[in-house]
Amino acid sequence: MGPVVTAGRVMTPAPITLVEHVKKSGRPDADDLAVLLTQIAVAGKIIARELARAALVGQLGTTGETNVQGETVKKLDVWANAVVVRAMEETGLVTTVVSEEMDAPLRLTKTGARGRYVVCFDPVDGSSNLDVNGIVGTIFSIRHGSDAEQPGTAQVAAGYIMYGPSTLMVLTTGDGVDGFTLGPTIGEFVRSHHRIRIPARGRIYSVNEGNFSKWEPGVQRYVEYLRGMDRATGRPYTARYVGSLVADLHRTLLEGGIYLYPADAGKSDGKLRLQYEAAPMGFIAEQAGGSASTGRERIMTIEPATPHQRVPLVIGSSEDVALAEDFIAGRRR
Ligand code: AHM
Ligand code: MG
């Protein structure tokens, strides 16, 4: 709601904070979820502050190590992972955490009988952007119980925090998608985007096109189609690629279009991880009226076989995703 004029005076309505928003949802677990999300928000604020000063305090660059997934580990990956783990432990509500930065799921021993959630997260997604002051994010996915491997349909809530010109949390608790901007003067996440809906079709595509020659023919034909000229179907599409899923998905959510990270000759399951990248983003996309697929099946119903399982990801406006699936299946050429 914008400013309200009452008797000649402009009254700005009190902002709706993240906690208020969750508590007003009327869910039976609203209080617990509010605690959990408050702690995720605290971790986000701490990470945002560290990102802002990382170049000044020696926090850029790598640790010199490689993680279980064969990727170079950045100092901020490790540091932010510890921040999120601690924030989750302090809730007393989390039994298990699954993180991109930890080889195996971690059981949180401090949690007693109140433990009832599993939290899967990527503390710093898009970390190749860290050393160039680019946009990164934290992705999180909340499920019940203690089972580290559950399908996307088991998610109670999911979201991301985007560290851009402003710090923004986008959240779904299964009843639409809302955005909360961190108000720098009050230090709280305040609702700034109410009931985000993704357009049914967009005009932007987002993919690492440097991998073109490694893709399967259906993906190649689809991207060639998007680059083709046809006024009636709004082509050619515009290309945008930040290389940070949070930033690329956020733009897709607001403006429509499609993001793809397909399988390729060197990555038969794609790059992105199901539990803390594809599934939470899939939940958000669907809750905003969009779709998320591997190109062949719905992301949300895939049963993870391992904590760090990878999947191809095709996500965004429902009509764009459906057309990509048609090309991948060979129904369109
Ligand atoms: P990360 O979690 O190690 O940063 O990897 C995930 C990131 C996504 O944010 C992004 O969409 C993708 O990797 C970019 O990969 P590429 O550099 O291969 O295009
Ligand atoms: Mg990631």
Image (cartoon, rainbow, N blue to C red):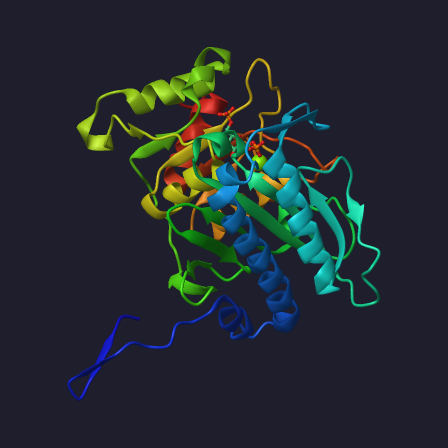
Counting from the top left corner in percent of width and height, residue 267 is at: 60, 19
Image quarter (top left, top right, bottom left or bottom right) of the C terminus: top left
For this rendering, which residue is in front, 319 or 20? 20
In the rendered image, is residue 304 in sight?
yes
Q: Is residue 163 above or below residue 77?
A: below
Which residue of the protein is positioned furthest toward the bottom in this rendering? Answer: 7
Tell me the quarter of the picture where residue 63 sits.
top right
Q: What residue is rendered at 68% in x and 42% in y?
A: 99
Q: Which residue is drawn at 64% across and 25% down?
A: 71
Q: For the N terminus, which image quadrant?
A: bottom left
From what the image shows, is residue 189 above or below residue 291?
A: below
Task: Spot the residue most to the left.
Answer: 8
Whether residue 177 is situated above or below residue 243 in the rendered picture? below
Look at 51% across and 12% down and name the residue there: 214
Q: Is residue 276 left or right of residue 117?
A: left
In the rendered image of this protein, does residue 118 appear above or below residue 125?
Answer: below
